[in-house]
Amino acid sequence: MSLPTITKQFELASRPEGWPTLENFRLAEAPLAELQDGQVLVKNLAISVDPYMRGRMNDVKSYVPPFQLDQPLDGGAVGEVLASRAEGLAEGDVVVHGLGWREYAVLPAGAVKKVDASLAPATAFLGALGMTGLTAYAGLVKVAEFKAGDVVFVSGAAGAVGSLVGQIAKQLGASWVIGSAGTPEKVAKLLELGFDAAFDYHDGPIKEQLKVALAGAPGENTGIDVYFDNVGGEHLEAAISALNTFGRVALCGAISQYNSTEPPVAPRNLALAIGKQLTLRGFIVNSYSQYADEYAALVAPLLTNGKIRYEETVVHGIENTAQAFIDMLAGANTGKMVITLD
């Protein structure tokens, strides 16, 4: 079999102002570097698009460098090794790596991680068995310091991370788990996944809907103990109002303002954090990679026996990657948004 010498890849054609459009992206062809000692050639089977990528499209300093104009974008991917000049990696191995948004990639062995493809479909290693799952676990358990009996509220709960947060919380003994989502269908899905209560944030003020969702909590629970924030803005403001004394917040994302061209107006009640003695902690999953094995040991059997389920929205074809990214930002996905290339 002759090896590919060219790859299709998406490049950043211009920086978005507000919501991204297809004009901000360019599907191009580029030559593949010749394989060197210690490197592998990988054919991507599936690639991930995630909310954090929107921030990288702005030319601002952050925890990861911004994407460069007229250069390929990158992100999570899972693929098959087509050729290897690296010890410990062989043709046919399935690996995860960070050069998504393209068909093929040449990478050093240290930039890929071999996975057991017999455990689950390849896409699962971008979601429940990958960075997405670790984000959910680390944010809930290590950042928000969840403990059994806690009442948990998750925003963006039908997304890839949020849907796992709620399920993990239930498995670890949460007394009540509430999720917010953007459509009636997503609300129904959350209840199907085992959330105790869920609401559509379009149906009214979030603070009031959260109060209603808390009404069913057992015992004398009148507030929440843990808030896992994927959204920011009005959701964070409502959570601060509803948090119990010594409540904890894991700040994972703020998707409500990623595409905004105006300064955010919420939360306006941050002073409540003083009297309630709240803890609000931002986190980046890369700082918690040491817990990957701990997470895998917990979740693998739960996935096998169906006690935790992962949702995916699958788009086919490399040419549809940019549109899938735009759709994901608009909430078109339930669970993980992935693009398959086979």
Image (cartoon, helix red, strand yellow):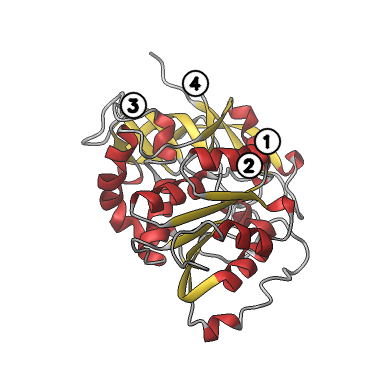
Up/down of 116 relative to 242, above or below:
above
The residue labelled by disc 3 is 83
Q: Residue 167: give its label.
A: none
The residue drawn where x is 37% and y is 62% is 149
Q: Nearer the viewer, mark 3 or mark 2?
A: 2
Left or right of 21 on screen, residue 32 = left
Distance CA(mark 1)–CA(mark 4)? 18 Å
Q: Mark 2 or mark 1: which is in front?
A: 2
Give yes or no for contact between labels 3 and 4 (Cβ–Cβ under 8 Å). no
Q: Earlier in the sequence, mark 2 or mark 4?
A: 2
Contact between marks 2 and 4 (CB within 8 A): the answer is no
Residue 284: % across, % down: 45, 61
Q: Earlier in the sequence, mark 1 or mark 4?
A: 1
User: Residue at 26% across / 28% down in the picture?
Assistant: 90
Q: Are marks 1 and 3 in contact (CB under 8 Å)?
A: no
Q: CA distance from mark 3 to mark 4?
A: 18 Å
Q: Is residue 60 visible?
A: yes
Residue placed most toward the observer, 17 or 303: 303
Going by the numbered disc 3, the residue's amino acid type is: Ala
Helix or strand or loop: what does disc 2 sit on? helix
Residue 54 image offset from top left, x and y in percent? 63, 52
* Mark with earlier residue (3, 2): 3
**Residue 269 screen position, x and y as percent:** 65, 78
Q: Residue at x 30, y 50 (%)?
A: 295
What residue did someone put label 4 on?
A: 342
Is the residue marked by circle 3 packed among few (<14), some (14-19), or many (20+) residues within 10 Å? some
**Cα–Cα gap, marks 2 and 1:** 8 Å
Q: Which residue is mark 2?
A: 328
Kind of residue at disc 1: Gln
Q: Which residue is mark 1?
A: 323
Are dots 2 and 1 in contact, CB under 8 Å? no
What secondary structure is marked by label 4? loop
